[in-house]
Image (cartoon, coloured by chain):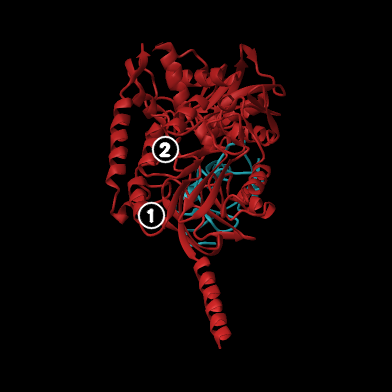
Chain colours: A red, B cyan
């Protein structure tokens, strides 16, 4: 009898111990990606509704944090994009993220757009670790961080796309090496396996690549992604790996709830909360930061960057050569190292009067987020491009060309497609089969305004390399998606202080 | 790089986005009139989303494929 009682007590103790050790813990991961400084609500292209607004997102995040132990993570491309961010080289965004108490961020490809020195400054201002395990050569980036939530250790490894060198100006990544994301993650999975309960990859490689990563590397519990701006409504599971991504521009907050037992995820539930002004509740401290920088941005746009010694004509760009068209085309040619430039006059939206030139003026002239591209075109393709540009003369279509490095004559009374007469580059007649480096903008390069001529060169530029700090391909001469054309123009004017472009007779009507 | 829009190939320069692919495919106007861009798994994608070799984009009406 005594033995039976002792035995029963022992069994009871063992069962009790097991129950205590199998504690079930609920934790939460909140995530955003590709914010790009879109601090205020806005109407996305094609939408009738205002979406986003970081103050609304912050209020929601703060409320959700009170419900269970939570991490707030950023999957890259946070500091660059909107004027609200760019005018301060991302300082506004870091201040915002500090206020929101982000726990970690992975560097995105666009974080490099202001250059390494600025990125290091931003990292030093951040009150959270900025990760980049596969970036070699920048000590400020940490490969991983281990966070603890309710006794659960979560290792967070950050990786960024290996394509970063070709999505920003090569000088921005000079001296850096972007190693294989897959090999890097495998190495850290092996290293961190016994140091943490959960392994989370904070990834800026895109959803397509996240899926491949999940297939090839075992041991990843969660991938919080970015870069592809994908709206993943519910977590995707590949093997034992969960993949999430929260769209873009603060239009969604990702919520991933994990139930953890004995250090293992036994249950998960995730979704996106769409963020819009109709939610009503703002985080007032964050709103103060948004408004504060908005006011500073407005003041910054009044900065005088130079002086126009003559009126700069942006009004007649759709029907004839203008001095402003010449100036912008010249800047593009000089920046890209091309022999000529062809751009659409319609991309130049207004004039600048003689006198001080404000930042705001340049923003008004060049409001679109276009960047400079240069490709090799044959003389035949140049003629085709100019014919296309002149084909909408009668309706003053935006495709009317503004040029640099070349002059051409045309007969407006001839039928469309047969208007161009003489074309000269560097004073010499253009040869049909000879190739010339021609600068344009990314819009025309992909066939915007109906320009087809650049498409063949783009097609032939599929294979390329970064050589000597510049992108070189079969027909690719220059591409800098990391810097808008208007910022290039601003830098040009700031450097020269006074500008006085003249119409030079590059585009001549003949009958 | 080569991507596919509504199963037709589109050639772009590195660093270009969904928006560029749609311009090249002549479908940006569809987005302006309310259609959305989706990946091959049915997830909506933002116009500034980055692309990679072989990515498939579908332009569909908002209520799905």
Residue B20 vs B42, above or below: the answer is above
Q: Which mark is residue A486?
A: none
Question: If you read the primary sequence from the N terminus, does the residue marked by circle 2 or circle 1 appear first?
Answer: 1
From this viewpoint, is residue A250 visible? yes
* Residue at position x 52%, y 79% in the image: A9
Q: Is residue A68 left or right of residue A356?
A: right
- A409 or A325: nearer the eye? A325
Q: Which residue is mark 2?
A: A127
Residue A324 vs A446, above or below: the answer is above
How many marks are shown on the rendered structure?
A: 2
Based on the displayed image, in which of its 4 quarters is residue A429 positioned? top right
- A16 or B27: nearer the eye? A16
Chain holding disc 2: A
Residue A348 image offset from top left, x and y in percent: 43, 28
From this viewpoint, is residue A50 visible? no
C-alpha distance separating marks 2 and 1: 18 Å
* Residue at position x 51%, y 18% in the image: A330
């Amino acid at each position: 009898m005594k033995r039976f009682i002792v035995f029963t007590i022992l069994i009871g103790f063992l069962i009790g111990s097991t129950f205590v050790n199998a504690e079930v813990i609920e934790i939460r991961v909140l995530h955003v990606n590709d914010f790009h400084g879109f601090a205020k609500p806005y109407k996305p292209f094609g939408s009738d509704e205002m979406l986003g607004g970081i103050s609304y997102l912050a209020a929601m995040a703060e409320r959700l944090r009170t419900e269970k132990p939570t991490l707030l993570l950023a999957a890259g491309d946070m500091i660059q994009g909107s004027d609200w961010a760019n005018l301060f080289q991302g300082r506004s965004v870091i201040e915002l993220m500090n206020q929101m108490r982000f726990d970690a961020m992975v560097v995105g490809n666009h974080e490099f757009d202001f250059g390494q020195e600025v990125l290091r400054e931003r990292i030093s201002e951040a009150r959270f670790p900025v990760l980049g395990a596969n970036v070699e050569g920048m000590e400020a980036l940490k490969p991983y961080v281990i966070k603890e939530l309710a006794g659960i250790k979560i290792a967070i490894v950050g990786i960024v796309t290996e394509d970063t060198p070709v999505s920003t100006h090569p000088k921005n990544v000079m001296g850096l090496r972007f190693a294989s994301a897959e090999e890097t993650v495998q190495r850290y999975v092996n290293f961190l396996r016994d140091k943490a309960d959960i392994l989370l990859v904070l990834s800026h490689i895109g959803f397509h690549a996240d899926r491949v990563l999940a297939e090839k590397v075992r041991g990843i519990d969660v991938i919080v992604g970015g870069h592809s701006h994908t709206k993943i409504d519910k977590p995707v599971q590949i093997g034992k790996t969960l993949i999430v991504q929260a769209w873009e521009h603060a239009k969604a907050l990702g919520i991933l709830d994990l139930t953890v037992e004995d250090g293992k995820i036994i249950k998960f539930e995730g979704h996106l909360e769409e963020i819009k002004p109709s939610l009503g509740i703002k985080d007032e401290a964050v709103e103060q930061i948004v408004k504060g920088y908005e006011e500073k941005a407005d003041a910054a746009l009044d900065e005088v960057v130079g002086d126009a010694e003559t009126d700069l004509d942006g009004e007649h760009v759709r029907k004839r050569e203008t001095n402003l068209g010449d100036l912008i085309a010249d800047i593009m040619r000089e920046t890209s190292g091309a022999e000529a430039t062809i751009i659409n006059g319609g991309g130049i939206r207004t004039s600048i009067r003689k006198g001080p030139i404000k930042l705001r003026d340049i923003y008004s002239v060049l409001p679109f987020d276009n960047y400079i591209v240069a490709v090799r075109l044959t003389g035949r393709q140049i003629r085709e491009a100019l014919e296309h540009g002149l084909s909408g003369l009668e309706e003053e279509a935006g495709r009317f060309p503004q040029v640099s490095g070349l002059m051409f004559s045309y007969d407006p009374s001839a039928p469309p497609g047969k208007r161009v007469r003489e074309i000269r580059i560097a004073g010499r007649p253009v040869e049909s089969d000879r190739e010339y480096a021609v600068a344009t903008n990314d819009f025309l390069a992909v066939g915007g305004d109906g320009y087809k001529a650049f498409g063949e060169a783009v097609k032939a530029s599929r294979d390329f390399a970064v050589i000597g700090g510049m992108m070189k391909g079969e027909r690719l001469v220059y591409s800098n998606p990391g810097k808008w054309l208007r910022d290039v123009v601003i830098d040009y004017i700031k450097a020269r202080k006074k500008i006085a472009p003249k119409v030079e007779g590059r585009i001549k009507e003949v009958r | 790089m080569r991507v596919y829009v509504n199963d037709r190939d589109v050639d772009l320069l590195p660093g270009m986005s969904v928006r560029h692919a749609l311009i090249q495919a002549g479908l940006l106007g569809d987005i302006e009139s309310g259609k959305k861009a989706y990946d091959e798994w049915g997830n909506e994608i933002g116009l500034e989303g980055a692309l990679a070799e072989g990515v498939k984009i579908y332009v569909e009406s908002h209520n799905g494929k």
